[in-house]
C-alpha cells in the first residue's frame, strides 16, 4: 500500500472513531443533564447547610465574646473596688495604674517575664513620689507595698468616707 492510501485509511479510521465518540456523547447528554441537575441540587443543599452552620458558629462566637467582655468588665470593677486602683494594659509589657483617689494621674509600669520583674517608668507624676519610690521600690523592692502606700496617702488627702461591709463567707 502506498503512503497516500495509508494516510487516507488512517484519516477515515480517525473520523469514524470520532463520530462514534460523538454519538456516545449525544446519548450520554440526556443522562449528563439529569446528573448535572442532581449534582447542582446536592451542592446547593450542601452550601445552604454550610451557610447555616457558619451563621450558627458566628452567633455562638458573638455570644462567647459578649460573655467574656462582661466578665472582664466585672473583674476590672472588682479589682478597682478592692484595691482603689484602675489597672489598664497599654501594650504587651506596659501597664497604667491610676488611683481612684487621684483621677487623671497615673503610674506607668513595665512588666517583664510575666510579672517577675516590674519597673516603674519615669513620668511627671512618678517624680512627685520620690520618697515612696525610694522606700518601697528601691528599698524593699515591693510594688504592692508602694501602691498600697500611695493609696493610703491619697485616701487621707481625699478624706475618704468609703464604707466597707464584711459578710461571712459561710
Image (cartoon, rainbow, N blue to C red):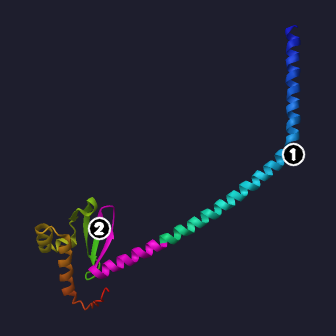
Q: Residue at x 29, y 81 (%)?
A: 82
Q: Which one is nearer the viewer's eye here, 158 or 11?
A: 11
Are the residues flagged by discs 2 and 1 in contact, CB closer than 8 Å? no
44 lies above or below 36: below
Residue 162 screen position, x and y as percent: 27, 90
Residue under the image location 44 percent in, 76 percent down: 70
Tally the marks.
Answer: 2
Foreground of the two, 120 or 52: 52
Tag of residue 30: 1
Against 93, residue 158 (above or below) is below
Q: Quadrant of the C terminus?
A: bottom left
Q: Quadrant of residue 144?
A: bottom left
Q: Is residue 97 left or right of residue 33?
A: left
**Few, some or many C-alpha atoms within 10 Å of disc 1 (few <14, some 14-19, many ≥20)?**
few
Quadrant assignment, res 81:
bottom left
Check disc 2 and report its element: helix, strand or loop: strand
Magenta-tinted stretch: 66-94
What x and y, as percent, mark residue 1? 88, 7
Side of 101 relative to 54 (left or right): left
Marks 2, 1: nearer the viewer? 1
Residue in view at x 72 percent, y 54 percent: 43
Residue 79 among magenta residues: yes
Question: On screen, 44 above or below 166?
Answer: above
The picture places residue 56, in percent across and down from the top left corner, at 60, 67
The one of 11 and 40 positioned closer to us in this rendering? 40
Q: Position of residue 29 (x, y in %)?
A: 85, 43
The CA span between labels 2 and 1 is 71 Å
Residue at the far top in the pictured view:
2
Residue 46 relative to residue 116: left or right: right
Q: What residue does disc 2 label?
A: 95
Main secondary structure along the magenta-highlighted residues:
helix
Q: Residues within 10 Å of mark 2 (few under 14, many from 20)?
A: many
Amino acid at each position: 500500500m502506498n503512503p497516500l492510501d495509508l494516510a487516507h485509511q488512517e484519516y477515515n479510521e480517525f473520523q469514524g472513531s470520532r463520530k462514534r465518540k460523538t454519538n456516545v456523547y449525544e446519548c450520554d447528554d440526556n443522562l449528563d443533564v439529569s446528573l448535572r441537575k442532581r449534582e447542582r441540587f446536592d451542592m446547593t443543599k450542601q452550601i445552604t447547610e454550610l451557610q447555616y452552620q457558619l451563621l450558627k458558629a458566628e452567633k455562638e462566637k458573638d455570644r462567647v465574646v459578649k460573655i467574656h467582655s462582661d466578665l472582664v468588665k466585672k473583674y476590672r470593677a472588682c479589682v478597682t473596688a478592692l484595691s482603689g486602683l484602675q489597672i489598664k494594659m497599654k501594650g504587651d509589657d506596659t501597664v497604667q495604674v491610676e488611683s481612684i483617689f487621684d483621677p487623671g494621674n497615673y503610674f506607668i509600669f513595665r512588666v517583664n517575664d510575666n510579672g517577675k520583674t516590674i519597673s516603674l517608668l519615669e513620668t511627671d507624676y512618678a517624680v512627685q513620689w520620690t520618697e515612696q519610690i525610694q522606700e518601697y521600690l528601691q528599698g524593699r523592692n515591693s510594688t504592692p507595698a508602694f501602691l498600697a502606700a500611695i493609696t493610703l496617702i491619697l485616701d487621707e488627702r481625699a478624706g475618704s468616707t468609703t464604707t466597707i461591709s464584711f459578710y461571712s463567707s459561710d
